[in-house]
Image (cartoon, helix red, strand yellow):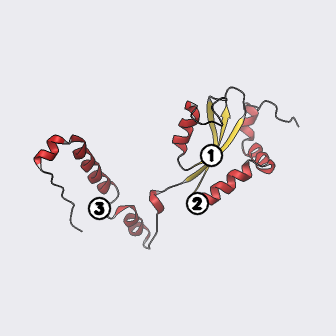
Amino acid sequence: MPAMAVTLPVQVVRDKPKLLDQVRDVIRRKSLFGAHGRGVCGLARKASGHALKIRRFFLMHYVYVLRSTSDGGLYIGYSANLRKRFQQHAQGDSFATSYRGPWKLIYYEAYTEQPDALGRERYLKSGGGRRFLQLQLAHYLKKNPICGAPRE
């Protein structure tokens, strides 16, 4: 496939500097994701030798655990964009966590399929899931005990 050439009329470039920046970004993305515009899927096929499908540019689904620094409580949640969701919690934009912040991310798991992540979130919110988290985060919880946690 030949290299992509983009030409714009001079008048459009003068009137719309943002349009020129958008075109440059498209060209950069094409070159970042592989030669000749094959994209990530083309690179994966080339590297592995067989057709490997990469879904939506590595879209992941996250189950996460936050800890309130004000009261020591935990919050378990799900998101497809962990960074954005954590910012919402930190800024107080989330109704469920706005009154208990600030928050610290202490644990997360990544899944490729949304139903798997939602099932894991449901499990972690159950009694067995909370016991699992206590075992998984034993060293962290030993250094930073949760207020009101049962003593053994």
Q: Residue at x 63, y 60 (%)?
A: 115
Given the image, on which type of amino acid does mark 2 rest? Answer: Glu
Q: Residue at x 35, y 62 (%)?
A: 39
> How much space separates mark 1 and mark 3, taking CA atoms?
34 Å
Question: Disc 1 or disc 2, which is closer to the eye?
Answer: 2
Give me the disc on residue 113: 2
Give the image location of residue 85, x and y in percent: 55, 41
Mark earlier in primary sequence (1, 3): 3
Pick the front one: 143 or 97:
97
Pick the front one: 71 or 136:
71
Mark earlier in primary sequence (2, 3): 3
Residue under numbered circle 1: 108
Left or right of 130? Residue 64 is left
Left or right of 32? Residue 70 is right
Give the image location of residue 20, x and y in percent: 22, 46
Q: Residue at x 57, y 53 (%)?
A: 61
